[in-house]
Amino acid sequence: MEKNYLHNLKCEACSGKTPKLNHKEIITNLRKINDWKANDENEMIFKRIDFKSFKQALEYTNLVGEIAEKENHHPDISLGYGYCLIMIYTHAIKGLSLNDFILAAKIDQISF
């Protein structure tokens, strides 16, 4: 199976009853995305992207926002001079679902 097949999937609405991914599922899905990491509690994935200017970081952040709107799955984003930090988790379950990895894979498709 192609490493980044996740970008072809669509995020599905979650509820508080959506099961959290277990540690093995998280590790398996981390291998399918580029340079994302899980936090120590395995409740969130994150990635920092560095840029040469604030303007580039802002443009990238706006592209991430467009993807998030299309998927109706919204990351937390920290933006500063020369960087963008994207943090993704499923708010409804306070943990990780497949949607988080789908969104990360779609973000990985941004050419910048």
Image (tube, helix red, strand yellow):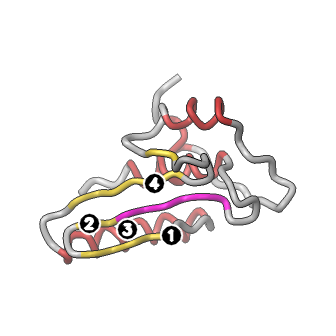
The mark lying in front, picked from 1 and 3, is 1
Q: Are marks 1 and 3 in contact (CB under 8 Å)?
A: no
Q: Residues within 10 Å of mark 2 (few under 14, many from 20)?
A: many
Query: On the image, numbered disc 4 is attached to which residue?
Result: 46
Query: On the image, numbered disc 2 is attached to which residue?
Result: 83
Above-or-below relation of 12 to 2: below
Reading the chain from its start, which is encountered first: label 3 or label 4?
4
Task: Give the structural element (helix, strand or loop) at label 2.
Answer: strand
Reading the chain from its start, which is encountered first: label 2 or label 1?
1
Number of callouts: 4
Task: Give the structural element (helix, strand or loop) at label 3.
Answer: helix
Query: On the image, numbered disc 3 is attached to which residue?
Result: 63
Please state if 41 lies on the left or on the right of 16 as rendered.
left
Query: Image quarter for residue 8?
Result: top right
Reading the chain from its start, which is encountered first: label 1 or label 3?
3
For the residues labelled 2 and 3, the Cα–Cα distance comes to 14 Å
Extreme residue in the left direction: 52
Q: Identify the residue at image location x=60%, y=46%.
A: 42
Please state if 46 lies on the left or on the right of 71 as rendered.
left
For the residues labelled 1 and 3, the Cα–Cα distance comes to 14 Å
**Amino acid type indicated by mark 2:** Tyr
Write the start and end of the magenta stretch as one range: 85-90
**Amino acid type indicated by mark 3:** Leu
Reading the chain from its start, which is encountered first: label 4 or label 1?
4
Query: On the image, numbered disc 1 is attached to which residue?
Result: 76
For the residues labelled 3 and 4, the Cα–Cα distance comes to 17 Å
Q: Identify the residue at image location x=46%, y=36%.
A: 4
